Image: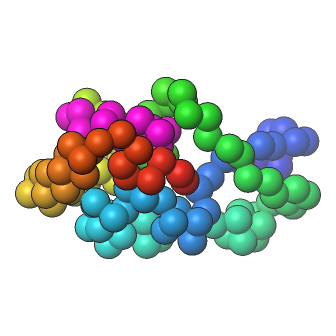
């Protein structure tokens, strides 16, 4: 990337920060996926690029990009098969693990608004 552009912006999820995301309470099996266990963090990027600034990027409540945290405030979206298929960690789960997680989330959602904690 250094050869192509003088400046770069790289968006990535920091593996240790992603462990705080409430969705993992329902889909624990995601933690064992290679894309989670081997995900590069900021320090890995520093090895290859001259990093000047690292800053968190807040995910807006209405984000529609379709990555895992995009629906953090609209947890019912995680029950939709199309949404699950667009999120790599959910799409890579065994069907029975994905179904079990969706059932747990659906049960919590049925308890009423504000469940689960809608905070990332």
> How many numbered discs sit on the rendered protein?
0
- Using the image as rendered, state which of residue 105 and residue 49 is in the foreground: 105
- In the picture shown, does residue 98 fall above or below 61? below
Q: Which colouring convention does the figure follow?
A: rainbow
- Using the image as rendered, state which of residue 4 and residue 41 is in the foreground: 41
- In the picture shown, does residue 77 fall above or below 52? above
Magenta segment includes 51: no
Residue occupying the far left of the picture: 96
- Secondary structure mostly seen in magenta is helix
Say whether residue 105 is left or right of residue 72: left
For the record, the magenta segment spans 70-81
Residue occupying the far front of the picture: 112
Q: Residue at x 54, y 53 (%)?
A: 120
Q: Residue at x 59, y 56 (%)?
A: 13
Residue 102 appears anywhere in the view: no
- Using the image as rendered, state which of residue 49 and residue 9 is in the foreground: 9
- In the picture shown, does residue 26 fall above or below 37? above
Percent coordinates x, y for residue 97 in the rendering: 15, 60
Percent coordinates x, y for residue 37 in the rendering: 43, 72
Q: Residue at x 59, y 66 (%)?
A: 17
Residue 104 appears anywhere in the view: yes
**Corner quadrant of residue 28:** bottom left
Percent coordinates x, y for residue 82 in the rendering: 25, 30
Q: Residue at x 68, y 44 (%)?
A: 58
Say whether residue 43 is left or right of residue 2: left
- In the picture shown, does residue 8 fall above or below 34? above
């Amino acid at each position: 990337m250094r050869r192509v552009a003088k400046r770069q912006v790289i968006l990535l999820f920091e593996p240790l920060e992603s462990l705080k995301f409430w969705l993992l309470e329902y889909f624990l099996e995601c933690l064992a996926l290679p894309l989670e266990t081997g995900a590069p963090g900021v320090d890995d990027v520093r090895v290859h690029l001259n990093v000047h600034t690292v800053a968190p990027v807040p995910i807006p409540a209405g984000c529609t990009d379709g990555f895992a945290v995009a629906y953090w405030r609209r947890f019912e979206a995680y029950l939709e098969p199309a949404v699950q298929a667009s999120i790599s960690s959910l799409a890579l789960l065994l069907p029975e693990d994905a179904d079990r997680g969706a059932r747990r989330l659906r049960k919590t959602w049925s308890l009423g608004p504000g469940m689960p904690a809608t905070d990332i």
